[in-house]
Image: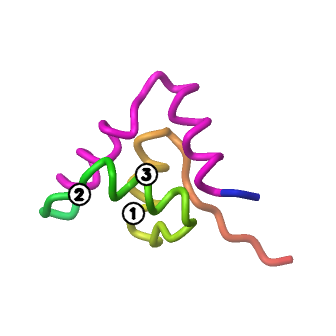
Amino acid sequence: MDIGKEIKKLTVERGLTLTYLAECISKEKGKHYSVQNLSSKLKKGTVNYNELVIILNKLNYKIKLEEK
């Protein structure tokens, strides 16, 4: 699964933009976070856990870990 493509798909489905998500990450982390940075991380698959939690929260999703 390509997490970057999945996040982009969910973003479009929710009627949101990567710009909005980048702004949300900036606000949560308290430092500048550009849409170019987010787009690059999604493309490379290098989004960290904290960023992913923020993004999924804004998309109305959560991470659930289950034992196999």
Give the x, y percent position of residue 10: 58, 36
Q: Amino acid at mark 1?
A: Glu
* Of callouts 2 and 3, the N-terminal one: 2
Q: Which of labels 2 and 1 is toward the front?
A: 2
Q: Amino acid at mark 2?
A: Tyr
The relative height of residue 49 versus residue 61 in the rendered view (above or below) is below
Q: How is the image coloured?
A: rainbow
Q: Which of labels 3 and 1 is toward the front?
A: 3
Where residue 31 sits, quadrant-wise, is bottom left
Give the x, y percent position of residue 26: 20, 55
Which region shows up in magenta? 3-27
- Any mark on residue 39, and which? 3
Task: Name the residue: 47% across, 22% down.
Answer: 15
Give the x, y percent position of residue 57: 43, 48
- Which residue is denoted by mark 1 in the rendering? 51
Instruction: Provide the secondary structure element on which disc 1 rests.
Output: helix
Q: Can residue 24 be found in the magenta stretch? A: yes
Q: Residue pushed farthest top?
A: 15
How many residues crowd around disc 3 within 10 Å: few (fewer than 14), some, or many (20 or more)?
some
Between 49 and 4, the residue placed more toward the observer is 4
Q: Can residue 67 be found in the magenta stretch? A: no
* Of callouts 3 and 1, the N-terminal one: 3
Task: Name the residue: 51% across, 71% down.
Answer: 46
Q: CA distance from mark 3 to mark 1?
A: 12 Å
- Which residue is denoted by mark 2 in the rendering? 33
**Magenta segment main secondary structure:** helix
